[in-house]
Image (cartoon, rainbow, N blue to C red):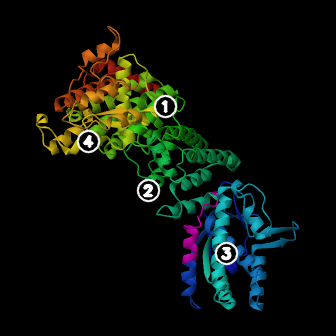
Amino acid sequence: MQIDAQVKSISDINQFFIVPDYQREYVWKANDQVKQFITDIDNAFETSNNDSSYYLGSVIIVKKQDNYDVIDGQQRLTTIVLTLCALKDFLESITRTESAENFYNAIKSWLSTFNMKTATHQNRVELQYEESQNYLGYLIHKKEYKGKVTPSIQKMQAAYDAMYEYIASLKNEGQDHLVDFITFFFNKIVLVFIVSADLHGALKIFETSNQRGASLDAMDLVKNLIFSEANEKDFPDIKSKWKMVVGNIHACKEGENPLRFLRYFLMARYCNNGILREEDIYKWIISEGEPLINYKNKPIEFVNALLSASERYSKLVNATSLADHHQAYPAVVNIGYINKYMSRQHLLLLLALDVNCEDEVINYLAKQLETLFFVSNTLGIQAKYNENNFSIWVQYFRGLKTIEQVKVAVEKTIAKYITKKAAEFKQTFLTKRHDAFNPLYRLRYILGTLENKAAELCNMPLKDHGFIQSLQVEHILPQTPKADVIPEEYGVDYLEYSGQVYMLGNVTLLESQINQAVNNFNDLSADWFKQKQSEYKNSALVLSKMLDNEFSIGKNTSTNQFIHDYKYAFTEWKKEQILQRQQVLLNLALLAWTINGQRIDQYKFADENEQRTNIDQVVTAVL
């Protein structure tokens, strides 16, 4: 591999550069990288002497006829051009000294020259990616731009404005000071140009130079890795599909952290050695991941896999974060409520399923994961332990297409794990305080799920998430007794009373208007509970309505059967009734959150021989 390294100041640069259309668009932010760029240059300028130079970084390029393709370094090279555009325009706006006039002309010549062969102006740097819209050319020649303003153009304009403001501040100390800066910028700022004979060699250099902590993240490295292995005739197809991958990630508002998608994608589809950390992604891909992914022999297939996975990832993230309530993935929406909107762990197993499996299969697995997260949340199991389990279980779910196949894999993994914790879960749930399920949206979701299970048993209409999340959390035993007086008949001191108030069995969902009506019924020496019951019966919620001891519907109805079977009838409200209701909520929870349709405390595993046969069939189908 032929490599030529050249150290050049900006004034020494005589090549013309093209940033190919497959390269990353301009992404430097004015208040971040550009600000740092200005700070670094300003510090170097203020402390410079005749012998010192300031190293700005490296640029990897490939010779292409009369120009050079930029493989790495396009961000800083574009920023240099933006700086010189700002210098040119500022000098043009002032009365220039002779020295400033000379630099003004030199800057214009550096930015663009007339090519006698083509009879056109040739710009020092040409951006070919679509997002640039030749905006840099408009700045170089100071022409009005009337085209589409892309995010990349917005960043270039912001960088230009920041540079212009900095240059104007230099002029405040006199034009000679500004000329000194221009002299420094042209002659003392140096870059190392690494010239490769071909694209493959350039990308190899790029890959090596970025492995240790380098300038780009693994997402950019993977993109360039794919281009390095693909035929140039496939570049337009790869570029188009990569743009769709990025678009899918942005569509679920994950554009600031694309590595999260890449990490879960690789763990879901290829990785067999547990958790893959973001910082290890690229190293893993080019080492032990290479034969698994086979990107060298089939780069197009790898891009296609990324594209299909990004589409599913985007939909599932949006369902989880409630950007819209996906009808296709209601269980994923539920996971967002129970395991926090920003939860992503479940995507690891959901991405592992066959790329063409039906939405109902994805949602079925999500329903099992919803149960796992509810149990984990109740038991206080940290998220890192679930992710570790998922990284091991994922191999059982890869390539599965049907619910029956998923059931077998669930029985081998999630069911075994959860059923072992069933006894602990039941014991813990019975002592659970409602604030253990904070934030409020999670508590409302849990109470709402229990409400809907009760409504289902009573043949009553179910409530949707929007309605559930609009409700108030009512403390049946008042949080603040009138005058802080607790009658002796309650047999507790204030501390014990407070503990009872915050038990899960002491809270119910209630419409805000009814909740306001019962707020004043807090005189424990009066008939406060009966007063509350008279309002509870007006609620549309089954578990709240039935707190009224006189509530019933007809004869031999499902509602009356529920009241009888669950002993959901209360004439007073003290510790005994709170614990009784908490037991009812536990029974409802065991019916609501199941594994393969079975209660976790009564789960019956398939016959071992039958199970072994099914697993073998799944493995055969995948292979």
4 or 1: mark nearer the eye: 4
Identify the residue under disc 1.
329
Identify the amino acid type marked 4.
Gln
* Quadrant where the N terminus is found in the figure: bottom right
Q: Are marks 4 and 1 in contact (CB under 8 Å)?
A: no
In the image shown, does 385 or 399 lie closer to the viewer?
385
* Cα distance between the residues tagged 2 and 4: 49 Å
Q: Viewer-proximal residue, 517 or 335?
A: 517
The answer to whether residue 596 of the structure is visible from this angle is no
Give percent across and percent down for residue 392.
Answer: 35, 39
Q: Which residue is mark 3?
A: 164
- Label of residue 479 in the image: 4
Q: Amino acid at mark 2?
A: Glu
Reading the chain from its start, which is encountered first: label 3 or label 2? 3
Q: Residue shown at 18%/40% (left/top)?
A: 497
Magenta stretch, residue numbers: 23-39
Residue 305 shown left or right of residue 66 in the figure: left
Which disc, if any, is residue 279? 2
Q: Quadrant of residue 175?
A: bottom right
Q: Is residue 489 left or right of residue 586?
A: left
Q: Give the amino acid at mark 3.
A: Tyr
Look at label 1 and name its amino acid: Tyr
Of circles 2 and 1, which is in front? 1
Mark before the other along the chain sequence, 2 or 1: 2
Q: Quadrant of residue 560?
A: top left
Foreground mark, 3 or 2, reads 3
Measured Cα–Cα span from mark 3 to mark 4:
61 Å
Q: Give the quarter of the image for residue 557.
A: top left
Q: Is residue 465 above or below residue 485?
A: above
